[in-house]
Image (cartoon, rainbow, N blue to C red):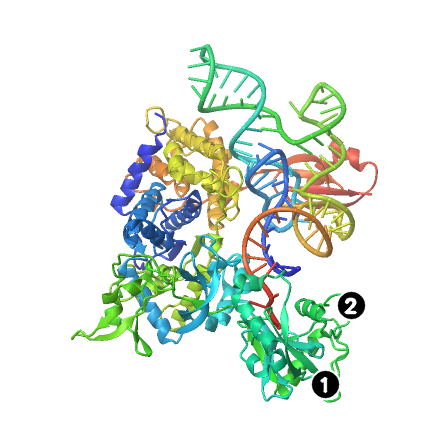
Amino acid sequence: MSYDHKSIESRWQKFWSENQTFKSEDISTDKPKYYVLDMFPYPSGAGLHVGHALGYVATDIVARYKRMKGFNVLHPMGWDAFGLPAEQYAIKTGTHPKETTHQNISNFKKQINSLGFSYDWSREINTTDPNYYKWTQWIFMQLYNKGLAYEQEVAVNWCPELKAVLANEEVVNGKSDIGGHPVVRLPMRQWILKITDYAESLLDGLDDLDWPENIKELQKNWIGKSEGVELGFDIDGHNDTINVYTTRPDTLFGASYMVLAPEHTLIHSIVTDEQRSKVEAYIEETKKKSDFDRTEVNKDKTGVFTGSYAINPFSKEKIEIWIADYVLISYGTGAIMAVPGHDERDWEFASKYNLPIVEVVEGGDVSKAAYTAKGNAKIINSSNDKTLSMDGLSVDQAIKEAILFIEKNSIGKATVNYKLRDWLFSRQRYWGEPFPLIHKDDSVELIQEKDLPVMLPEVENYKPSNDGKSPLSLVKNWVEVKDESGNIIGLRETNTMPQWAGSCWYFLRFTDPNNTIEAWSKERENYWMPVDLYIGGQEHAVLHLLYARFWHHVLYDLDLVSTKEPFKKLYNQGMILGDDGTKMSKSRGNVINPEEIMDEYGSDSMRLYEMFMGPLNKSKPWSTKGLQGCYRFVNKLWSIIVDENGNLSSKIVDNDEEDKDTLFLHHQTIKKLGEDIENLHFNTAVSQLMIYCNHLQKCSTVSKKLIEELVIILSPFVPHLSEEFWSLLGHSETITYQPWPQFDESLIQLDEVTIAVQVNGKLRANINIAKDSDEKDVISEAMSLENVKKFTSDGNIVKTIYVPNRLLNFVVK
RNA sequence: GCCCGGGUGGUGAAAUUGGUAGACACAAGGGACUUAAAAUCCCUCGGAGAUAAUACUCCGUGCCGGUUCGAGUCCGGCCCCGGGCACCA
């Protein structure tokens, strides 16, 4: 009988579902816990992608392995279902996003189940379910009460095409991350979360995390901490001072002009009548520019002189004050001291407008380019009788000296700045979580906790308006909040929360998904958190992964969770490319549909192949030929264990006698599989299984005990097939909770080893000799070989290097 | 420009972290079985040379140099590819 993957796989999927095989204990008193999590998907209409499967197979193998190692495993799945596609589909067709979402989820779930994943479906969650978003709103209330949510008129990233405001993280090169539509700056009233309050905390927490270095680096760069000093420059003839932020106070003597951002409020009071019209025209010009145009690095710098002067607090010289859009109002103080000698941007600007360039760090030629060396570079031209002298100091020393002087004379103080901006948290959208907020006259109030959730109302029109009002603003009887006698007491906030809100805490809800009294019980949270292993794509490096950490840090400070960091170990799966080596896309026609693959070859083969393709974190091209190789392997396994009549093969015997080679491979395979799964090196685990099975195929008999252990270690990779084998081997229970077999280290040791014999580092011969032979014996054996003699006879052996059981090297001169 | 990754056969990749480079698989070629095909099984498979020989020699992990008895692995300098950030003072 041939291997019929369809009937085997559907039979065991049904068995697992009916028996709730993978249900975790809420809290186990005798088993240690292991929480292994996938980044839950947005259930798109396109269905499951082979790239989804890659990460899910990896976590499933770990989950199944840990169960066999005696852990109480939490391996849940859910749906991050609020989001634009369902809403855009609703605008086009009038179908309620709820319906689209429902259909997509059931399709996704069907596809996920057909891959044989061991999820505990009793914990399934859906971010659009009021029983879930009730608690998303509740967490927002905690943030609000802690003073971390505020409303402000701000220049926002408005996308006219999507008719929505986007977060900085969602804007890429002046275009929307989703769809690539142009984004412009517009002032709008918005809800903002003070993530900047947690900049330091988020930076600190990274140190102890077992995350890929590049992701940590990405977050570090995004937070963008810089240490410097904020100091005031007096304005000549005014009472005001201009505050600037600099990381190079050592170059203060070289500050030969100043620049204010065009939005800077001081401009109007310092501009001279003579320059006023030019300055105002420039400000107007700036307003018209998109953020993208303004931050384009290679564009020509422009600016206008204000007519006023400031006094350099170190040199006491009068320097011109300009405005220019290369200075950003949103960073530092919105004003800079310009040091053209040692800053490329300032140099470019000074050259264009003929502003003085002063050399204060020795080593370059400031008439040709800015000289930006730091560290030990020497300070020159930096002394003044009235203030201080820094000549001869290194840059590092001068920075310290300058700060000391600045603080002592109350000119300014040492300051830390971050590139991270507060998180714009409202969207003019229907398909998102409503805010638990009511506007009353001039104030805003949270609703009562007992009134949660604020339900998303039914609407007829999902289209946002052109002026940035959410479709919810049209639902009068929802917006108006009335008291018992029908008087309007306030108006609901009509913006909704961004897509990221639901995913900021879903891993907490999985620990206690059906709790109706609280978001999670402290006890269960304490038992399960943190997530031990989190696998997903790299695209969330500064979005979901930073936002979720932010919320978690806040919850920790509020004593609502027991760990500061939510995800102990993070691992990024690589991308699966099309067989042409490019990204899979419909337009290229190189998309592989997992359903077709599973239909033809079975999900066990597909799982195995995705793991065998290469290292989990690397990008690699799909090859259906490669998959067929795994299919061949699976069939080979079948032919070893099952005979033509579908019974257990007669070569499997109850005899315990085994030859050394088989025992060696058997124990080596158990050891290697365990190590490889722990290290997420699934590709080498699969190849070890292939090596072992190639050997077994050649054996005339194999003991049943070995086959049983083999089937157990196979089961995380090919779970359906393994259950089938397990039952053929005479077991009625699932294989899921069989203990992982022990390996015997002594059987992995060979009695005879091959030692490479080198002369001057070049291989000249191999000798087979008893393991742990004396160095003397190895040398005399080696010396007797013709080829060794040939290369050693020309000179004297000056040195002999012996690596036991591995290598012998003669150094001949 | 700055910060991360990464360059190994025709292809996906291994290499116990300084010790026999190319495991395992794909593709290709040859053979067995078959009327034939599929499936399966066996053999060859980095390059060059040499041989009766799968005895042997030389070259080979992006390029150049260094450390070492010995380098894919460590150090210095480049080149190329992928990703991220980018007028952040």
Query: Callout 2: residue from which chain?
Result: A
Q: Earlier in the sequence, mark 2 or mark 1?
A: 2
In the displayed structure, does residue A545 sit left or right of residue A772?
left
User: Where is the N terminus of chain A found, in terms of image quarters?
Assistant: top left
Is label 2 or label 1 in front?
A: 2
**Which residue bears the numbered disc 1?**
A388
Above or below, comparing residue A395 to residue A43 in the picture: below
- On the same chain, marks 2 and 1? The answer is yes
Task: Specify the amino acid type for callout 1.
Answer: Leu
Label for residue A134? none
Task: Specify the amino acid type for callout 2.
Answer: Asp
Q: At which x and y percent is residue A491?
A: 28, 72
Residue A75 in view, yes or no: no
Question: Are circles 2 and 1 on residues that touch, CB within 8 Å?
Answer: no
Above or below, comparing residue A184 to residue A1 in the picture: below
Query: Label 2: how many residues lie within 10 Å, few (<14), some (14-19) or many (20+)?
Result: few
Looking at this view, name the residue that lies furthest to the left.
Answer: A485
Tell me which residue sits at (57%, 63%) in the image.
A295
Task: Give SS at disc 1.
Answer: loop
In the displayed structure, does residue A364 sit left or right of residue A629?
right
Q: At which x and y percent is residue A586?
A: 45, 41
**Which residue bears the numbered disc 2?**
A365
Q: At which x and y percent is residue A123?
A: 30, 54
Q: At which x and y percent is residue A58?
A: 43, 47
Tell me which residue sits at (47%, 38%) in the image.
A590
User: Where is the C terminus of chain A found, in terms of image quarters?
Assistant: top right
Q: CA distance from mark 2 to mark 1?
A: 25 Å
Camera-side residue of B40 and A161: A161
Query: Callout 1: residue from which chain?
Result: A
